[in-house]
Every structure is written in structure tokens, then in C-alpha cells.
Image: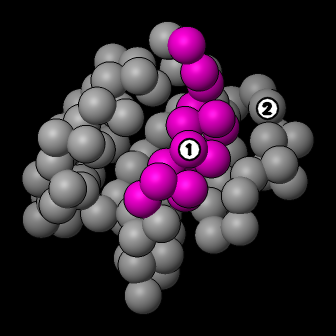
Amino acid sequence: MHVQFVFEDAGYVVIQADSADEALLALDRHPEIGAIFTDVAMPGSIDGAALAARVRQSHPHVSIVVTSGEQFHVAEHLPVGVRFVPKPYAGHDIIRMIGQSAA
């Protein structure tokens, strides 16, 4: 929830998804989505790392930042262009990473 406010304060419109499956549906329903921030630990049929891989394939224009508090090895297995930030993180770091990915 904290990151939602950081994104909104930075001028982003936030669409929340309760699972990776819902995130994929949201991407299909909202082609204007330009960035995704996800935790590795996501409910649903796939986790956040698999979500990042799918999004990179199906929506290559979308900036993706993945986080985890426990799975630091995830970063080396993410697709090219997907950024990883370990927990704890500062909200402004996420905004900066999203901006750098979009540039």
C-alpha cells in the first residue's frame, strides 16, 4: 500500500492486482499501462518473477521492477531489462527505476 501512495504522489495512476493472474488481465484491459511493480511472492498460478517474464514477452514496452525480501537470487534469473530491488527499499528508488526503464 505504501508504494501505491508513492506512485500516486509521483503522478502515476495505480491499478492494483491481487495476483499475477489479475495483473496479466489488467494489462490486457488497460493497454496504457506503462509500468509494473511486483513482489516475487504473489498468489495465483505464477509468481512475480514469472509475471515479469511473461510481461517482458507480451508487453515489451512496459517497465518492470521486481522486489523480494528473501529471494535475492531472483535478480540474476530475470529477463533483460527487468530491474530488481531488494526489500527494504525506499519508494523514491522504485520511481527512479521505473523512470530509468522507460527512458
Graded by Cα atoms within 10 Å as few (under 14), some (14 to 19) or many (20 or more), the crowding at tag 2 reads few
87 on left or right of 77 = left
Q: Position of residue 25 (x, y in %)?
A: 28, 31
Type of amino acid under label 1 = Arg
Where does the image place residue 84, in percent across and percent down from the top left?
A: 66, 54
The mark found on residue 54 in the picture is 1
> Which secondary structure, mark 1?
helix
| Residue at (24, 36) in percent of width and height | 26
Name the residue at 12% across, 65% down. 11
- Which tag, 1 or 2, sits closer to the chain's start? 1
Q: Position of residue 93 (x, y in %)?
A: 48, 63
Q: Is residue 82 left or right of residue 63?
A: right
Q: Which mark is residue 40?
A: none
Residue at 59% over, 21% down: 46
Tell me which amino acid carries mark 2. Gln
Give the residues in magenta: 45-59
SS at circle 2: loop
Residue 67 vertical placement versus 6 (above, below): above
- Quadrant of residue 17 in the image? top left
Which residue is tagged 2?
A: 71
Please name the residue shown 45% across and 26% down the image: 20
Q: State yes or no: residue 87 in magenta.
A: no
